[in-house]
Amino acid sequence: MSRTAILVIVVVVLLGLGIGFGTGLYVVPRYEVSASCCVGQSAVARAETLWFLRPGLAAPFISSDGGMLIRYKKEGLSLFERIGRVVEYRDRVQRRAILRLPYLPLLYRLSAEGRSPVKYDEAF
């Protein structure tokens, strides 16, 4: 094998590892959140999958709101603390987003130990 071919293979492998270890997927399901400011109104989170830069977040390759809630519950945090951390975590992921993809229910279930977020999964 020539030196050029070996160099190309090494570069491709290093790029693949860099993408795999340096980025991740965060799945945001569609759900309604009641707005406390306005009676009778609610906000709807857009269902999407975010491809984001992972360094510094200590995040798994595939994560989601539900998966992070499960992870924080195992750490012994209260529900209030878990929700606060998930909101903060999602904000940080959204700031690091490279690409927004459609919602992928399979990725959500992989990140949340096989659980489905809500009935909206069937609509996608």
Image (spheres, rainbow, N blue to C red):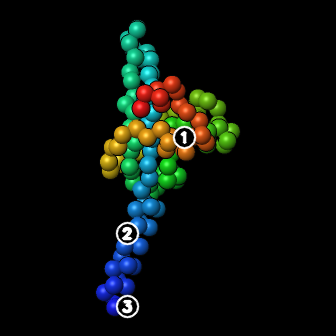
Q: Secondary structure at mark 3?
A: loop
Measured Cα–Cα span from mark 3 to mark 2: 21 Å
User: Is 85 located above or below residue 19 in the figure?
Assistant: above
Residue 98 x %, y %: 32, 50
Lateral position of residue 61 relative to residue 2, left or right: right
Q: Which quadrant: the C terminus?
A: top left
Q: Is residue 67 visible?
A: no
Measured Cα–Cα span from mark 2 to mark 1: 28 Å
Q: Nearer the viewer, mark 1 or mark 3?
A: 3
Around disc 3, counting alpha carbons within 10 Å, would you say few (fewer than 14), some (14 to 19), or many (20 or more)?
few
Residue that numbered label 2 is attached to? 15
- Look at the image and tell me in which quarter the N terminus lies: bottom left
Location of residue 30 (image quadrant): top left
Q: Which residue is mark 3?
A: 1
Farthest residue to the bottom: give it: 2
At label 1, counting other C-alpha atoms closer than 10 Å, the crowd grade (few under 14, some 14-19, many 20 or more) is some
Neighbours of disc 2 within 10 Å: few (<14), some (14-19), many (20+): few
Labels 3 & 2 near each other (Cβ < 8 A): no
Q: Are marks 2 and 1 in contact (CB under 8 Å)?
A: no
Which residue does the image show at 48% across and 30% down from the upper left? 121
Three-letter residue code for mark 1: Arg
Report which quarter residue 16 is drawn in.
Answer: bottom left
Q: Amino acid at mark 2?
A: Leu
Judging by the rendered image, the residue that carries numbered circle 1 is: 109
Of the image marks 1 and 3, the number of the one nearer the N terminus: 3
Residue 2, image x, y percentages = 34, 91
Which residue type does callout 3 highlight?
Answer: Met
Rendered position, 119 above or below 105:
above
